[in-house]
Amino acid sequence: AEHLAASLELGVVNAREELKARMDDRGPDGRLLRGDTAGTADEILLLGFWAWRCGPNSTMRDLMRGLRGRRVFLFGTMAAWPDSDHARDCLSCARELLAEGGNEVLGHFFCQGRLDPDVRKNSRHPLTPEREQRLAEAEKHPNAEDFSAALEAARAVLIPLMP
């Protein structure tokens, strides 16, 4: 997120801070009384997350559920291969969450990323030699090559939309 923001000269909104600001705007039934405050309605949001249980992590899921009518570029990390069925499931989940609010996903970029050691220790997935190899590779990401590829993917979506 920091690399994309700096390279594209964009502001950054912390998802946890955005959600905290929204908590004060909930009615008695728990529904939000106002929409998101992340940027302006005509701005494109770049939403970054780490994959968790076939979708965005819980903080990002909550943020996505509050977005209405926004244009979005997704980027994220996962311990899985970025071209795997798991990655496609994560993208599908994120798209569905965003579609609930009438948001449009303009593009995405996923790469591998380190798996939290506590998550790894408590995983219900068997530690096969193949999984061990994939997790070892994930420890090396994101790297400079991933940052460059993410920037290229974001630019491919954003540049044609800029005035």
Image (spheres, rainbow, N blue to C red):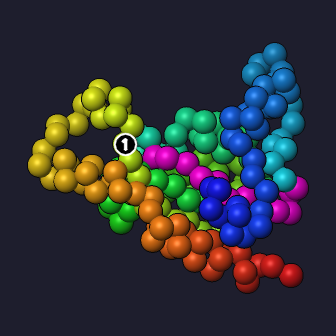
Name the residue tied to disc 1. 115
What is the residue that sits farthest to the left in this orientation?
129
* Residue 72 visible in the displayed image: no
The crowd level at tag 1 (other Cα within 10 Å; few <14, some 14-19, many 20+) is many
Position of residue 18 measured from the top left corner of the image (x, y, whole percent): 76, 38
- What residue sits 48% from the left and 67% below the top? 144
Quadrant where the image shows the N terminus: bottom right
Quadrant housing residue 23: top right
69 sits to left or right of 2: right
Position of residue 68 measured from the top left corner of the image (x, y, whole percent): 77, 49
Q: Amino acid at mark 1?
A: Leu
In this rendering, the answer to whether 124 lies above or below 85 is above
68 sits to left or right of 2: right
What is the residue that sits farthest to the top in this orientation?
28
Q: Residue 42: say if magenta.
A: yes
- What residue sits 52% from the left and 67% below the top? 147
Quadrant housing residue 142: bottom left
Position of residue 111 measured from the top left corner of the image (x, y, whole percent): 43, 61
Quadrant where the image shows the C terminus: bottom right
Image: magenta residue range: 40-51
Q: How many numbered tags mark residues here?
A: 1
- What residue sits 77% from the left and 19% below the top? 29
Determine the secondary structure under disc 1.
Answer: loop
